Image: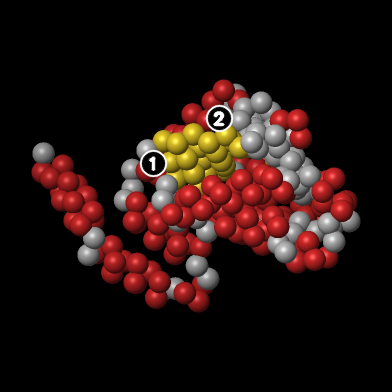
Amino acid sequence: MSLRIEELPDRLVVTLDRPEKRNAVDADLVAALHEVCARLEQEPRLLLLTGGTDGIFAAGADIGQLRERGRLDALAAINSALFGRIRALPMPTVAAIDGPALGGGAELSYACDLRVCTARAFFGQPEVRLGIIAGAGATHRLPALVGEARAKELLFTGRRVDAAEALRIGLVNRVVDEPGELLDGAHQLLDEIAKGSALALRLTKLAVDAPVAAHPHLDLVSQAVLFEDEEKRRRMTEFLDRKKT
C-alpha cells in the first residue's frame, strides 16, 4: 500500500507511505488518493494529509514515470485531476509537511485548504529545470497563496522556500519547531475547525472557493440555508444562555 489511513470520528488521517521513493507521486499513489476522495465525498469529514514525521512529505512526481509520459498523458490530467478533486472535497483539509515538498508534492500540499509544517520543511517548483511546467495546480494556486509576482519568481527560478519564508509569505499557516510536534499541531488546527457547524464549514468552503461572479448570490443562498438549520438555532441559543450566566 502507498497510503496508511487512520479513521477518527470526525476526520481521516492519510499518510503517504512510499519511503523508498521519498513519497514521489506515482500512478499507484494517485489511484489510492482517488479512493480516499471518493470516501470523503460520500461521507464528508475533515482530512489530515501528511507524509509523516520522517523528514519527507513528497519529493515531487515520479520522474521515471514522468519522463515516459507523452502529450496524451498530459491531456489526461493525471495529477491535476486528483489535486482538483482534493481541493473540492466538501470539508476542510490540512496538509502536515515535514521536509521537502517539491514539484508535484508541493502542488499536492497547495490542493489542501491549510498547511502546517516543521521548521525543516521546504517547498519548491523545479519543473522548468526539467523542461516542463508546474502543471498540477501551482500556476493558479500558488499566485492565490503568495501573490502573482512572488509566484512567478518561484515558478520561473525553481528556488526553494524554507519554512520561515513560507510562513512569512503565507504559503503555510503554522510552523512547529520539532517534527514530533507536527501531527499534534495539525490536529490542534483541525480541532479548532471542528468546533464549527459542519454545514456552515461546508458552505463557507464552497463560498470561498467559488468564482468571484458567484458572489454575492452564493453567499445569500448559503446564509438562507443556514438560517433555517436547527444547528444554527441551537448554537445561538447556547451562546445567548452563556451570556446570561
Q: Is residue 237 visible?
A: yes
Q: Position of residue 186 (x, y in %)?
A: 50, 35
Amino acid type, label 1:
Asp
Horizontal arrangement in the rendering, residue 182 relative to residue 123 (left or right): left
Horizontal arrangement in the rendering, residue 5 relative to residue 79 (left or right): left
For the residue pair 113 and 161, the one nearer the viewer reads as 113
Q: Mark 2 and mark 1 in contact (Cβ < 8 Å)?
A: no
Question: Residue at point 34% right, 51% down?
Answer: 198
Question: Residue at point 79% right, 44% down?
Answer: 62
For the residue pair 46 and 18, the one nearer the viewer reads as 18
In this rendering, the answer to whether 150 lies above or below 161 is: below
Of circles 1 and 2, the one toward us is 1
Quadrant including the N terminus:
top right
Q: Quadrant of residue 230?
A: bottom left
Question: Residue at point 74% right, 41% down?
Answer: 24
In this rendering, the answer to whether 159 lies above or below 177 is: below
Residue located beneath label 2 in the image? 182
Quadrant including the C terminus:
top left
Q: Position of residue 144 (x, y in %)?
A: 61, 59
For the residue pair 60 and 239, the one nearer the viewer reads as 60
Q: Position of residue 40 (x, y in %)?
A: 47, 50
Amino acid type, label 2:
Leu
For the residue pair 202 and 167, the one nearer the viewer reads as 202
Label 2: element kind: helix
Question: Residue at point 37% right, 38% down?
Answer: 9
Q: Which mark is residue 10?
A: 1
Chain-order first, disc 1 or disc 2: 1
